Image: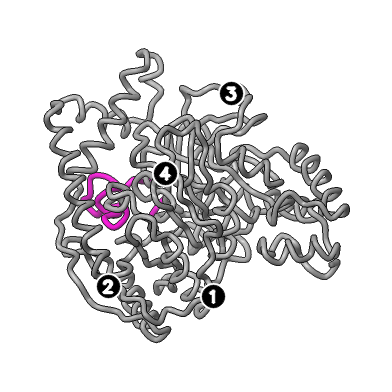
Amino acid sequence: MSDTDLGTLDAQILNQLFESRKASPLEATRAALGRIDRFNEAVNAYVYVDAEGAEEAAKASTRRWQQGKPLSPIDGIPVSMKDLTEVAGMPCRAGSLTSSTALCDTDAPPARLLREAGAIFLGKTNTPEFGWKAVTDNRVFGATCNPWDTRLTPGGSSGGAAAAAALNMGVLHQGGDSGGSIRIPAAFTGVFGFKPTFGWTPQWPPAQEPTLSHLGPLTRSVRDAVSMLNVMGRYDYRDPYATRGQPDCWGSDLNKSLVGLRIGYSADLGYANVDPQIASRVKEAAHKMQALGAEIVEVDPDFSSPLDTFRKIWFTASLAQWQQMDQEKRDQLDPGMVANAREAATWSALDLFHALSDRAELTRRLEHFNQQYHLLMTPAVAVMPFDINREVPPGSGMRDWEEWAPFSYPFNLSQQPSASVPCGFTDRGLPVGFQLSGGKFDDVRVLRACHAFMEAHPPRFPSVPNLPQNT
């Protein structure tokens, strides 16, 4: 394999090479570490790299493959973990000055499951403080940059994972999504991001607002996402919200056509203001889905913006975290997170109760929608990637990130599966993604449709970070 850059390959091909002994996990790990060495300075995707630990684990994986005894199909595959997830032997700073530099002594559920499958942990990827916003910058590690234009944000909160996936700094990348934190950066960087049905990918310790949080993959293909889900999408008793019933194989329907699928397409959900170029690319994608055999019906899902509902719940989680801290730590927090907490402090318990009731009604409406349509197709994000170290596009007049990401958090409130699929580029060469969402537990169907589109219309990725001259 001397003529092949192992760092450019996906999990499926690497698995075949390991099995045939044409390449080893150690070689693949060194290739991934080499790409981190080459690219990470430009994009700041990784905030912690354990090269020594990765090589030792890769040597053990190589021995298993040589003996014909791999632990799983992803044994030896290089993986990154979001820096909100505890991994034994690595710090978990969560992008916060209030966190400890100590190394964790236990694995959170996704780390345990991936480690038991033989995955090779390369390190931790960047996130905003406690994952509170949809761009990736913090006071500990600074901002992550978009590989397509390093002046711009990759989105967040899994922005480090998305940038790493776009540049193949590792093959499988774990993200978390409480309001769009997998799908938003996937759209901004042109990779695939999937938020499973709530409770199917366990987590512990819990997120600050655990009923919104879904863990999932950011990858270059749906097959790689399935490889990751087949491992981390399993029950773990430590998560009190974890549910059973996951498919034996999350990709069991990937080879099925789209014939027979009825997809509702909404350009704006009836209330969102979408950039015209994004709207155009997503409409083109809807036509392409129809050409693949799906029935596309332009629809109005018949619900109003749940922005206030989401803020009531999300900001209250920030308030709970803020109240647990002494004044010294409060002074170290991101001012935007503090502002959210202070706003929540003015609300009553009844305000939160009404928000939870509204959430239930939204979920009812969306589940009812999915009795008539198999999937709902929308833009993934309403705006193009914008300047780093900004929470909203400059000059937009917006207050915070929820305003430019109106398509994502409704499906955290409803706890339904949802994905961002790359579908082209703007005139500036910036990625665009569309979103596909399904009813609860329809994850296999969502993945099937995403795969069909990406197989027919393969995305392209940056070969190196784009470092334009500032003007």
Q: Nearer the viewer, residue 383 or 260?
A: 260
Q: Which three-letter amino acid code belongs to the residue tagged 2?
A: Tyr
Classify 226 as above or below 52. Answer: below
- Is 142 contained in the magenta span? no
Q: Are marks 3 and 2 in contact (CB under 8 Å)?
A: no
In the image, which is nearer the foreground, mark 2 or mark 4? 4
Closer to us: 363 or 419: 363
Q: Earlier in the sequence, mark 2 or mark 4?
A: 4
Instruction: Write the residue at 42% across / 83% down.
Output: 292
Which one is nearer the viewer's eye here, 260 or 457? 260
Of callouts 3 and 2, which one flags the residue occurring earlier in the amino acid sequence?
3
**Three-letter amino acid code at the position of disc 1:** Asn
Q: Residue at horizontal 54%, vertical 49%? A: 161
3 or 1: tag closer to the N-terminus: 3
Q: Residue at x 40, y 84 (%)?
A: 293
Gap between marks 2 and 1 measured at Cα = 23 Å
Which amino acid, mark 3? Thr
The type of residue carrying mark 4 is Gly
Q: Which mark is residue 101?
A: 3
Give the residue pinned by disc 1: 255
Which label belongs to residue 178? Answer: none
**Residue bounds of the magenta highlight:** 386-408
As measured in the structure, the alpha-carbon distance from the residue carrying label 2 to the one carrying label 4 is: 27 Å
How far, Cα to Cα, is label 4 from label 1?
26 Å
Q: Which residue is mark 4?
A: 199
Q: In the image, what residue occupies the spot 39% across and 46% down?
A: 198
Relative horizontal placement of residue 398, taking residue 172 as reference (left or right): left
